[in-house]
Image (tube, helix red, strand yellow):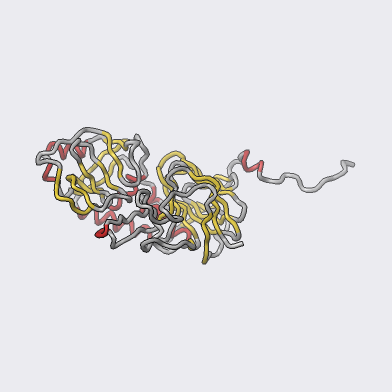
Amino acid sequence: MSAALEILAAGPGVTLQDAGRFGLMRFGVTAAGPMDPLAFATANRAAGAPAGAAAIEISLGGLELTAAGASVPLALAGGAFDIALDGMRLPPAARLTLEPGARLRVRAGAAGARCYLALGARLALPPELGALATPARSGLGGLGGGRALAAGDRLPLEALGPPGGAPAGLVAPWLDRPGDVIRVIEGPQADYFADDQILAFCAGPWSVSPRSDRMAYILDGPRLRHARGFNIISDGIAMGAIQVPGDGQPIVLMADRQVTGGYTKIATVIGADLGRLAQLRPGARFRFATVPLKDAVAARRAEQAALAAPLAIEPVIRTALSPELLLGVNLIDGVTSGD
């Protein structure tokens, strides 16, 4: 039997994402890719995968899977999700080897909206337009047709790396990112808003609407007023661009964004805070803080320096026996007559 990961259960929005499609926006093709690039890169590095390699982006609906045919090195990083390997609790950022028949369960935990499962192997799937990234609305990538993963799916693997040994936690302090302040730089149409509206934008408070998805985070909060109208000649959209349409309700364009837009953009989330915003759950409250471009560049450099440093791990120490674990363990060894 060839090596594979078998999906036992998957909630809505669990997708395959690699670094994304680049150089195709002029043809109307969005890049897609991870919503939290820093967590995605951390998981890939811990798994021994190349930078930008395809991983599974796990949403709040969770994921359960097993290995078939071979042991598969894996790593997880992202929000504070509830992770268990055959009933043994693991840290939210962890490295492990998934043995054939073992069950890895990932569920929403104390915080965060996304978790990344990176593979110490290569997915034996054909790319579409140069990538496996799965934009939900475009019908591209993934297992074909651009759909989310579902129970019964089989992900074929090749070029497996060496087993990673016993499960271990990742020491990744750069993933500890409180999301109550999101840094932005001034947008290209900030002059379409009066000074008091810029102040209102920064003061908020804002919350993530339940209508948000991988294409855009719709924000609930004060309604902003335009000083010079809200329509512009359509231009390119960067991830993190914050549009303000005519109703005054800001929209942050995310990984599956459209490639152009004709609404004013008041600000842009800095690259180092894209993951911080992406990890906010519906209803989470936050505010914006405007920073100069040099601060945005410095934050990105600090992020890259953290990723380049040696990655520390710590052993997982079992502190309790769960009912699930006990049910899965054979506690009887041999039979006697009782004499």
**Depth check: 145 or 320 in front?**
145
Tell me: 167 left or right of 77. right
Tell me: 291 left or right of 4. left
Q: Is residue 54 visible?
A: yes
Q: Quadrant of the N terminus?
A: bottom right
Q: Residue furthest bottom?
A: 159
Q: Residue at x 58, y 43 (%)?
A: 319
Q: Which quadrant of the view contains residue 327? A: top right
Q: Which quadrant of the view contains residue 242? A: top left
- How far across and how far down the image is residue 298, in percent? 26, 56
**Depth check: 80 or 156 in front?**
156
- How far across and how far down the image is residue 120, in percent? 50, 61
Q: Residue at x 28, y 62 (%)?
A: 23
Q: Residue at x 46, y 40 (%)?
A: 109
Q: Residue at x 37, y 58 (%)?
A: 19
- How far across and how far down the image is residue 274, in percent? 31, 49
Q: Is residue 309 visible?
A: no
Q: Residue furthest right?
A: 339
- How far across and how far down the image is residue 270, in percent? 26, 51
